[in-house]
Amino acid sequence: MGDREVTADPNDRFDLSRPNMIGLAAAVGMGVAVSSPASAGPSPTGLGHPITPWQSRPRSLGAAGARPQDDDRIAELVPPPPLDVPLDAAPEDHPMRKTFAAVPPAPESALAAQTISWRRADIGAANGHGNARFLARVLSPISLEGKANGVQLLGPATIDLIFQEQANGTDLVLAMPARWGIGYALPKPEAVPDIPNERICYWGGWGGSMAVMNPDRRTTFAYVMNKMGQVTSAGTERTQKYTRLIYQALGSPTGNT
């Protein structure tokens, strides 16, 4: 089976014949996706640092922050419905309260990603910029024995660590069932039935973005959106459908057929 890079971008609001920026939820949940020419180089301000996905020729880039010249390519974020997170009911030292106190999962928090202050910030864990194709390329070494374009980036032992279970139960921050390896979630069919019980690691973001890596099938796919959806432990309706159809095409039936 050849190497697979499966990407999906919604086109319900934007013309994707040009590299628009699509809303991307990452880490604490906010960010945008952008495609930039590889030859553009780093931002002279030191913000919006391009991240080159080991390409041998000019291709799309991702970056932390966004450069002023890319502002007109940023897609408008459509916030999700309010997420019912009982922060007030949690003790002050509860992990959920500590995590969401500064940036609660509310529509107004999502809209902060459209401000100039957010775009010019350089927050590696939160405001990365890239489209779905870039996200799939960046994460593809996990599925390709640690390699990307012939460059060895991860060793087999490092990749194996990802799949060693660290926790299995209700996540104290998300209040959702989850099974964790190192850095990524692992299959938990009773909670996420569209992820097959294979050697897979994955995670998503607030609003419904998602990336799935499957080393045994040498497959990586990613989805980002600008219209944020309501997220459950199983993802959004869109990510559930994409995941189910992709794995059906790969001949691996999931829990929801």
Image (cartoon, grey):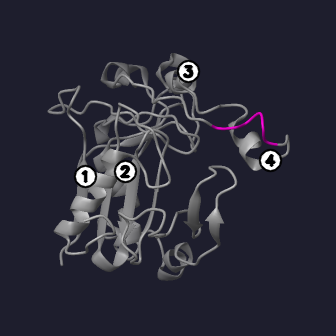
Is residue 145 covered in magenta?
Answer: no
Pointers 1 and 2 in contact (C-beta within 8 Å):
yes
- Which residue is nearer to you in this view: 91 or 127? 91
- On residue 135, the disc is 2
Q: Amino acid at mark 4?
A: His
- On residue 94, the disc is 4
- On residue 7, the disc is 1
Q: Which badge, 2 or 4, comes first in the chain's sequence?
A: 4
Q: Which badge, 3 or 1, comes first in the chain's sequence?
A: 1
Write down the region rendered in magenta: 85-90
Above or below 174: residue 43: above
Above or below 183: residue 235: above
Q: Main secondary structure of the magenta part?
A: loop
Q: Which badge, 1 or 2, comes first in the chain's sequence?
A: 1
- In the picture of the structure, the residue carrying the numbered disc 3 is 108
- Is the N terminus in the top left, top right, bottom left or bottom right quadrant? bottom left
Label 1, secondary structure: give it: strand
